[in-house]
Structure formats: C-alpha cells, structure tokens
Image (tube, helix red, strand yellow):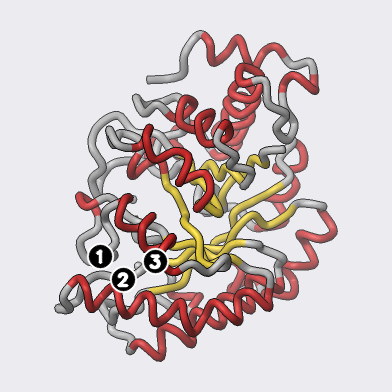
Amino acid sequence: MIDVAVSQLTSSRWDLNHEVERAVALGFQSMSLWRPKVSDLGTSRAARILKASGVRASSLQWAGGFTGGDGRSFDESVEDAVEAIVMAAAVSAPVLVIHSGCRSGHTKSHARRLLVQAFGRLAPLAARAGVALAVKPVHPDVAAGCSFLSCLTEALELVESVGDPSVRLALDLWHFAHEPAMEGMLPRLALASAVVQVADRCGPPTDEADRLPAGHGVLPLEHLVAGLVAHGYAGTLEFDPVGEAVEILGYEGVWQETRLVADAWASRSGDVWTHAAAATGDATAVDHFRAGGVGSRRSHASSHSGSPG
C-alpha cells in the first residue's frame, strides 16, 4: 500500500492540532513534519497529538549542512543531526531528510567526503532509532548556497556506494521530474528512495518559482509516480506545495485537491493506496483530474526557517 502524506510546509500557519484534525477529515493518515514547528510545540507534546489522532509522521525535515556553509562546524552539524534523529524517533518518523550543505570553498570531492563521514557517524545511531537518513539532492539552478549535491545521478550513486540500509535518498520530483534520464533511473530510484516529495511547476526550477499543487504545472508527476510504484517503491508520497498558488487556494483547498489527485492516480494505476478512490467509491476524484487541473535556511531546530530547495 502506498501511503499519501501532506506536509507542514504547505500549512505553515496552521498548528499541529488543526493539521491533524483536517488530515483525519480528508483521509490522510500521514504528515511530513517540519522540525521548527515540532521544536516550538515541544517534541513530547507533538508526539502525543499525533498518537491521539492516529496520524503518522512520514518524515521529519531537516538536518545537515555538514560542509560548514551555514557557519557551523562539521561537529556542530553532526551534533544537530543527532538531535534531529532523537526527535524523529520520538515522533515515530521513519525518515529524517538530510541536506548536504553547499561546497563552501571545498572541492566537490572533499565536500562529498564530509557528507560520507557524517553518515558514518550518524548511520549507526539512526539504525538503532529506526530512522532512515534520506539525503536530498537539489537541482543545480537552485542549489547555490544550500547544496553541493545537485545531480540526481551523483546522489543516487553516493547512496548506493555508502551501502548502508540506513542511508537512503529523498527524491523531490519538483527538482528532477523533467530530467530525460529519470525514466531509465526509475528501478534504482524506487529501491534507493525512502521518501518521494511531490510538487509541480510550469517553468524551470528557480529560487522564485512556486512549488505548485500537483496538476497545476507541466511535470509528468503521475507517470513518474506510477513508474516508481511499478518498480517496487512502497514508501510515502509527500505532497508539499508551497508559494503563491497555495496562498490563493488556501490550505484547506490545497489539501482537498491533493486528496483528489492522489485518489485519481491510484484509481487509474489500479494500485491500492491509502484512501484510494477505488476503495471509497469516489468517482469525483477520477473525473476531476481526467478533465485536467488548474494550469520558495540554518539549524538549531527552531532556526530552520526554510528548507534548502
């Protein structure tokens, strides 16, 4: 069963109590958690709210910056990532999203060594906590200042070369769905990815470009998701649009549309997804999206004001 999650990044001004209430009402069983919101609320309290609602945490975002580009030392970044692993375990999030950090004056090979060294220190702890470390590559057009890992192929090869089951990939389709090589990489991506993040766009990735709700742009999201599932991906699809379109539609409207999109994709693929339209008898979702849809950062946790990329 493919799980479908919505993100706290999308509903940035809602509090967790309201988010889980709306998630339950709309049939979402999972949410991607934003670390500053969990930190501000209190980890224990957040865990209690999730447990009482029955809504699972699909992932926690984010930790990383091991190259020192944000002013922290390597050891400080690793210590912060340890705190993030502890937080992820406390809220039962199976995935912690990792950002590499920018080159920060390093050669690319040295930046890569720092990331691998960080994984060497963090992976044993993550394994004991039951948390996967999912490194997220960022498209080169928006990677400046936040990530040296700007090639999907290189990121996939890095994860495969580490060879530790606790080190996985966070695949963000907003960044890479347009890549011609994606189709041929689907079998490897399906195996390596711990989470797949879903947002649409109309033009190339830029710092100013919105992360549009699925169906509002031109990316072949449904096709790629179907391919990943066909090749064995069984993780969570995290829908995380952010930007002006979300503000116009409103959080409730975006989450409602996301439910329709996910159910339509599931119905057309013939797969059983969480709250699939085929299971609920909801033909509206299918009809709505056959007709087509409507055609933008530093740690400690509380100072993660935005996610790179």
Asked if residue 45 lies left or right of residue 265, the reply is right
Residue drawn at (33%, 44%) of the image: 175
**Does the CB distance between marks 1 and 2 fall below 8 Å?**
yes
The reply to whether the C-beta atoms of the residues labelled 1 and 3 are less than 8 Å apart is: no
Residue 142 vertical position relative to residue 26 in the rendered view, above or below = below
Up/down of 140 relative to 46, above or below: above
Residue plotted at (37% across, 20% down):
295
- Specify which label sits upstream in the sequence, 1 or 3: 3
Q: Secondary structure at mark 3?
A: strand
- Front one among 206 and 186: 186
Residue holding disc 2: 101
41 left or right of 65 in image? right
Q: Which residue is mark 3?
A: 99
Q: Nearer the viewer, residue 60 or 119?
A: 119
Query: Vertical placement of 102 versus 5: above or below?
Result: below
Q: Amino acid at mark 3?
A: His
Question: Residue 33 falls in which quadrant of the image?
Answer: bottom right
Q: Amino acid at mark 2?
A: Gly
How packed mark 2 is, by other alpha carbons closer than 10 Å (few <14, some 14-19, many 20 or more), is many
Q: Residues within 10 Å of mark 1 (few under 14, many from 20)?
A: many
Badge 2 element: loop
Q: Residue at x 35, y 56 (%)?
A: 137
Q: Which residue in the protein does label 1 denote?
A: 148
Q: Say whether marks 3 and 2 touch (CB < 8 Å).
A: yes
**In-image side of 40 versus 110 (left or right):** right
The residues bearing labels 3 and 2 have C-alpha atoms spaced at a distance of 6 Å
Query: Residue 146 location in percent, x, y?
Result: 28, 65
**Dot 1 amino acid type:** Phe
